[in-house]
Amino acid sequence: MRVLILGGDGYLGWPTCMAFAASGHTVMTIDNYSRRRIAAETDSDPLLISPNLQDRAKIFRAVTDRTVQVEIGDCADYAVISKLVSTFLPDVIVHYAEQPSAPYSMMGFEPARMTLNNNLNTTFNILQAMIAFAPDAHLIKLGTMGEYGTPNIDIEEGWLEVEHAGRRQKFLYPRQAGSLYHTTKVLDTDLIWFYVRTYGLRVTDLMQGPVYGIHTHDSQADSRLFPNFHYDDIFGTVINRFIVQAVAGMPLTVYGRGGQVRGYLNLIDTLQCVALAADTPADKGELRIFNQFTETFSVNELATRVQRVGRGLGFAVDIQAIANPRKELEEHYYNPKSTGLHELGLIPHVMTDDVLAGVMTEVARYRDRIDVGRIMPRVRWN
């Protein structure tokens, strides 16, 4: 297949580029380095300094003899994305090209405006470009489980059958996001659903939980191919932050009471899910939604696991509750469904002690690069 990956310089984007190229597909990626810019502006650089996207592609080719074509440009500019789609003519479009940080979106007016404009304009542009130049292409859009919030009922897989006054109809499952970033993802879903039912596009929306991990199968040959492992409060997921805190000798900082439950998955499984979606595309005129996670944990459960594994490796690991900088329920009902990807063949890589120990051991190799000032929360929702 001809696979176009939007946002190929990101934590998920670059591993996805390598995975599709390693599988023999023709891969083109585009990025404007906005994550790198925001990380520099907010003192949130990743644990490892990654080569730029063009150099990553050169290193990957030298190691594997596989090619990733690179374009540097802004997907929020329709002239850029329309030219790329009309010339590359993709069969599959994987859409990661969004500002992905909830804390950044809550920092103030300019970060909020950037998040809103970038995320919605990029999604709008790619939908318009598909209509004009690639109406049969399959769009795989990265959504987030954060769109759903924490409702006091089971979270269905994207849709909800509603009975009202003796009639029934299926609707998009109600969303109640907890940050402006997550709200842009809700608006993405509504925008996509309009274009699917109006123009007959084919779209798979992957409602992904927080991801953890520092390498993939394709990055093993050269550490310069590692993804952008962030551990800070802006871009780092909670499990990656906990792992770095354990290695650095810091207490694992639990926000509030720590009862917040989310669905998590290994970075390797993100690649597996995207590949499964690409291999079995949605039908024309179908918005197919999968809840993309493999396990659910509370923050307290994650902290306890990291503490146990860290102490087993000889690290002094304590747990400390701190004031919650976010506006969220700290204890709640949470029962999300996830069957679609398993039916397509997903084989989960679960969070065993050995998996955590492997990530922790890898992080420990770069302990001298850890800046503990980047870990504690610097953004408050209120």
Image (cartoon, rainbow, N blue to C red):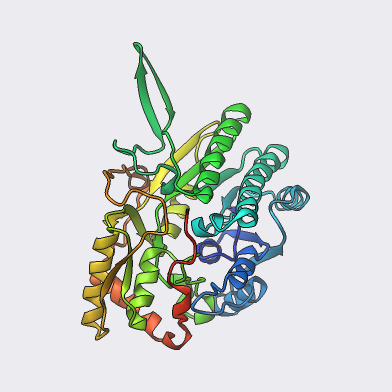
Please state the total of marks drawn on the protein image: 0
Taking depth in this image into account, of 340 and 358 the one nearest to the observer is 358
Quadrant housing residue 249: bottom left
Can residue 158 be seen at all in this image of the molecule?
yes
Task: Check the image and report above or below for 378 versus 246.
Answer: above
Taking depth in this image into account, of 84 and 66 the one nearest to the observer is 84
Q: Residue at x 42, y 53 (%)?
A: 273
Q: Is residue 265 left or right of residue 56?
A: left
Q: Is residue 68 left or right of residue 295?
A: right
Q: Is residue 16 left or right of residue 339?
A: right
Q: Which residue is the extreme one toward the bottom?
A: 368
Q: Position of residue 34 (x, y in %)?
A: 64, 63
Task: Check the image and report above or below for 280 versus 253.
Answer: above
Q: Position of residue 372 (x, y in %)?
A: 44, 79
Q: Position of residue 333 (x, y in %)?
A: 26, 43
Q: Is residue 60 left or right of residue 235?
A: right
Q: Residue at x 44, y 27 (%)?
A: 171
Q: Residue at x 49, y 43 (%)?
A: 205
Q: Position of residue 12 (x, y in %)?
A: 50, 62
Task: Check the image and report above or below for 89 versus 315.
Answer: above
Taking depth in this image into account, of 181 and 64 the one nearest to the observer is 181
Quadrant housing residue 174: top left
Taking depth in this image into account, of 264 and 379 the one nearest to the observer is 379
Quadrant housing residue 164: top left
Can residue 5 be seen at all in this image of the molecule?
no
